[in-house]
Image (tube, coloured by chain):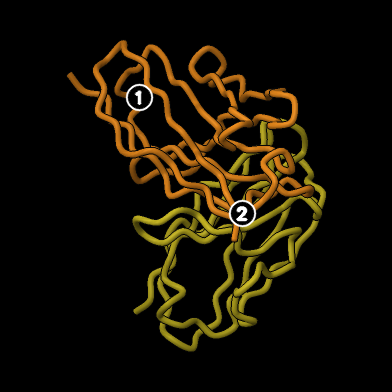
Chain colours: A yellow, B orange
Amino acid sequence: ENVLTQSPAIMSASPGEKVTMTCRASSSVSSSYLHWYQQKSGASPKLWIYRTSNLASGVPARFSGSGSGTSYSLTISSVEAEDAATYYCQQYSGYPFTFGSGTQLEIK
Amino acid sequence: EVQLQQSGPELVKPGASVKISCKTSGYTFTEYTIHWVKQSHGKSLEWIGGIIPYNGGTTYNQKFKGKATLTVDKSSSTAYMVLRSLTSEDSAVYYCATLTGYYALDYWGQGTSVTVSS
């Protein structure tokens, strides 16, 4: 099983700040099969970034994703209040596909 | 518009079974595999397994083999998951979701809360 470790577990940012969260895999993942989800409290996860760097429909351009191999990241260029949520990475390198433990983003 | 509508919250006794439904609409049911994900309170997401509506073929996370059984009813475009021999460890929110060609889960149901308590 390919274990995904996300860091930090919790982060706090002020509006307008740039933030980056990371996702590290225990084994290499194809960039085509590394995705990110946003989940707000009490809601279902939403596909946010797919195939490492492609924004899902409706996702603001301030979000971006990058990475390869065992190291991936999600960056928000200028955080806004509506970005408060938990972000999960997910990979497929054969079944089972796995999720990271999440990064909770709080807005000051 | 693709929609996945799940059945309502369940309160079940330890040792019992529960069947959760996921009714789909807005697309051809046999076009996408449907997967199920568990989220224990305040915790991360765990993949349970997936089913191919076209032929009923299934893939399970080894951790959930014997715990979960996935089926579909093509006539009603509905997927089902049965969880058996429930314990407090099975108390969680369960989601169904469709899988894209690049193994991302793009459309999600609203989740079904299962509480196991005597």
Alpha-carbon distance for marks 2 and 1? 34 Å
Q: Give the quadrant of residue B74.
A: top right
Q: Is mark 1 on a helix, strand or loop?
A: helix
Q: Give the quadrant of residue B69.
A: top right
Q: Say which mark, if any, is on residue B89.
A: 1
| A56 in relation to B62, above or below | below
Count of number-bearing discs: 2
The residue that appears at 37% across and 16% down in the rendered structure is: B17
The residue that appears at 41% across and 62% down in the rendered structure is: A40
Q: Give the quadrant of residue B58.
A: top right
In the depicted view, which residue is nearer to us: B105 or A30? Answer: B105
- Mark toward the start of the polypeptide (2 vs 1): 2
In this image, B76 relative to A52: left or right? left
- The three-letter code of the residue at mark 1 reads Glu
Q: Report the residue that reaches farthest toward the left.
A: B118
Q: For mark 2, what is the residue?
A: B26
Q: Nearer the viewer, mark 2 or mark 1?
A: 2
- The three-letter code of the residue at mark 2 reads Gly
Chain at tag 1: B
In the depicted view, which residue is nearer to us: A32 or A46? Answer: A46
